[in-house]
Amino acid sequence: MMRSIAIVTGATGGIGERFVKKICLMDDIDEVWAVGRNKDKLGSLSAQDPKVVPIEADLAHDGVAVIEDLLSGKKPDIRILVNNAGTGYMGPFEKMEKGSVTDLCKINCSVPAELISLSLSYMHEGARIINISSASSFQPNPYLAMYSASKVYLKNFSRALNVELRSRRITVTAVCPGWVDTGMLPRTKDGKEIRYTGMIDPETVVDKALKDSSKGKDMSVPGFFAKYFRFYSKVTPSNIVMSQWTNSIRKYL
Ligand SMILES: NC(=O)c1ccc[n+]([C@@H]2O[C@H](COP(=O)([O-])OP(=O)(O)OC[C@H]3O[C@@H](n4cnc5c(N)ncnc54)[C@H](OP(=O)(O)O)[C@@H]3O)[C@@H](O)[C@H]2O)c1
């Protein structure tokens, strides 16, 4: 019998791990394919819940091919795809290593599109795609330039695809949180604590994302700070927003 599955990339980190745990609780999901590189973390996720299928894959290299092979062998019914894996770089773009430039484009932009393209043949009416963008997609962010541009791409791609897939009754939701309390954020700079305005926990992001996607919304913006920032960046000239952002992070560069 065809298995109903969910695929979660970046399953070994803060937001992805929370998605895995929440989706495992859904009665209509038989398996949660948890994708990441950290073998120990994948092992501990599968030890905690028999629904978890650990998939060790590096999405900057042959990770998509690994998932493609598994899909063509098992031919499951994909009910939920969460494109959550992401990588960031904060600092002057000219100091970013060439390898990191290539990996960021791949992991944050091309991999989500490739996984959606692959998954659509295994999806039916009611399937959901959830793409983790960011509040940094609301305006250009100097010193986070590539990351925020990659999240604009993912947000706009998601919203447009949501319209295209309406006739198949498949929904696509872009999730745009502000700061989230996960391992992605550095906590100190030169011995000083870094403070993140309006930081929320991964659970808040995941609960709202699953709720919004079940309602067919094309955007999910969790927490007051991200909501306010979305509004503020719409009504304020972007030069002003960029300059305020740059001043607020300069001490951490
Ligand atoms: N934290 C925030 O403030 C924040 C705000 C807005 C949006 N986001 C977005 O939320 C998503 C999840 O991030 P997080 O905050 O939960 O950070 P995290 O704890 O650092 O998780 C990042 C995840 O991405 C995976 N990943 C990174 N490179 C990979 C690769 N080459 N191949 C496979 N997996 C890879 C990591 O898995 P392995 O290391 O096991 O490979 C990890 O599970 C990202 O897309 C991020 O941009 C985060």
Image: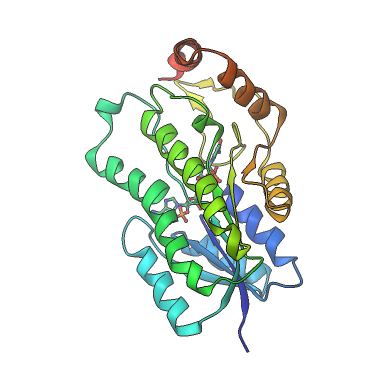
Q: Quadrant of the C terminus?
A: top left
Farthest bottom residue in view: 1
- With 189 as the anchor, is 205 left or right in this view? right
Residue 170 image offset from top left, x and y in percent:
60, 61
Q: Residue at x 49, y 41 (%)?
A: 156
Residue 76 vs 139, above or below: the answer is below
Compare residues 193 and 134 and report the one nearer the observer: 134
Residue 153 in sight from this viewpoint: yes
Q: Residue at x 68, y 70 (%)?
A: 49
Residue 15 vs 197, above or below: the answer is below
Residue 119 image offset from top left, x and y in percent:
49, 68
Q: Quadrant of the N terminus?
A: bottom right
Compare residues 171 and 134 and report the one nearer the observer: 171
Q: Residue at x 64, y 56 (%)?
A: 19
The quadrant holding residue 146 is top left
The quadrant holding residue 195 is top right
Residue 31 image offset from top left, x and y in percent:
63, 74
Q: Residue at x 38, y 64 (%)?
A: 63
Farthest front residue in view: 167
- With 162 as the anchor, is 18 left or right in this view? right
Residue 80 in sight from this viewpoint: no
Residue 95 image offset from top left, x and y in percent:
26, 28
Count of residue discs: 0
Compare residues 122 and 246 and report the one nearer the observer: 122
